[in-house]
Image: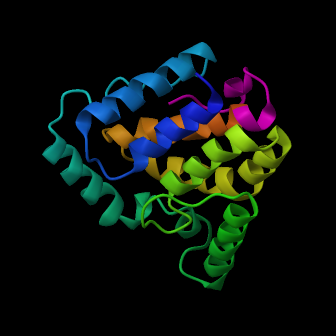
């Protein structure tokens, strides 16, 4: 599995759950990528046997009604001030510069959109472009989201956020042993 596929799979897991089978397939694919690259993060509990309705309820409770774990990177980086607007404009400009059309109706800083863009970059652009985006735009917000999940050990999305952090870190450094520099989930 390629890093583009890993980003696409994690992006799918951060979308609103609409198909439990599809989520389990994404989980298994991303889990294989993590194993192949010795990135220590188990996704085994994500979407295991939960009915779709329960996963949807958990998603809404976790991401829509809890600002601490909102999947909007701009929120984690800037709160609700003018700098967040500049960050969002910068994301949209980056997307346009690289021919990426965000899927769905999410804001440009939603983690699923950011990860879909990284998948796009992994398929289309040089690693240098992708690594700069990760360092400047993605990883600082993902780190803060992971910190917010530290208090939510029971959340199935905690491991998914950690997987995003590990894949970004490993991809950014270009070293398969990059996971040793960050805590495992």
> Could you say where residue 88 lies in the image, as x and y percent from the top left?
62, 73
Of 176 and 101, nearer the camera is 101
The residue that appears at 70% across and 39% down in the rendered structure is 122
Q: Residue 181: say if magenta.
A: yes
Q: In the rendered view, tell whether residue 91 sits above or below residue 133.
A: below
Furthest residue in direction right, as rendered: 128
Magenta-colored span: 171-185
Q: Residue 14 appears at what percent x and percent y?
A: 42, 48
Q: Position of residue 48 (x, y in %)?
A: 25, 27
Name the spot of residue 76 as percent of width and height, x first. Answer: 55, 64
- Residue at 52% over, 40% down: 8
Report the front residue among 80 and 90.
90
Occupied quadrant, residue 54: top left
Query: Is residue 46 among what the camera can see?
Result: no
Query: Is residue 97 positioned above or below 116 on the image?
Result: below
**Is 107 on the left or on the right of 134, as rendered?**
left
Residue found at x 32% / y 34%: 22
Q: Quadrant of residue 35?
A: top right
């Amino acid at each position: 599995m390629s890093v583009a596929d890993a980003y696409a799979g994690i992006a799918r897991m951060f979308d609103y759950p609409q198909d439990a089978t599809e989520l389990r397939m994404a989980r298994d694919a991303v889990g294989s990528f993590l194993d192949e690259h010795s990135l220590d993060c188990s996704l085994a509990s994500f979407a295991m046997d939960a009915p779709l309705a329960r996963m949807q309820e958990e998603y809404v409770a976790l991401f829509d009604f809890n600002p601490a774990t909102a999947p909007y990177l701009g929120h984690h980086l800037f709160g609700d001030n003018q700098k967040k607007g500049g960050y969002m404009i910068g994301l949209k400009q980056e997307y346009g510069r690289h021919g990426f059309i965000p899927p769905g109706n999410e804001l440009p800083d939603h983690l699923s959109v950011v990860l879909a863009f990284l998948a796009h970059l992994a398929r289309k652009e040089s690693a240098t472009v992708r690594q700069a985006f990760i360092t400047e735009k993605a990883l600082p917000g993902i780190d803060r989201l992971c910190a917010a999940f530290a208090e939510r050990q029971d959340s199935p999305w905690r491991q998914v956020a950690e997987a995003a952090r590990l894949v970004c870190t490993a991809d950014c450094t270009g070293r398969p042993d990059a996971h040793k520099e960050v805590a495992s989930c």
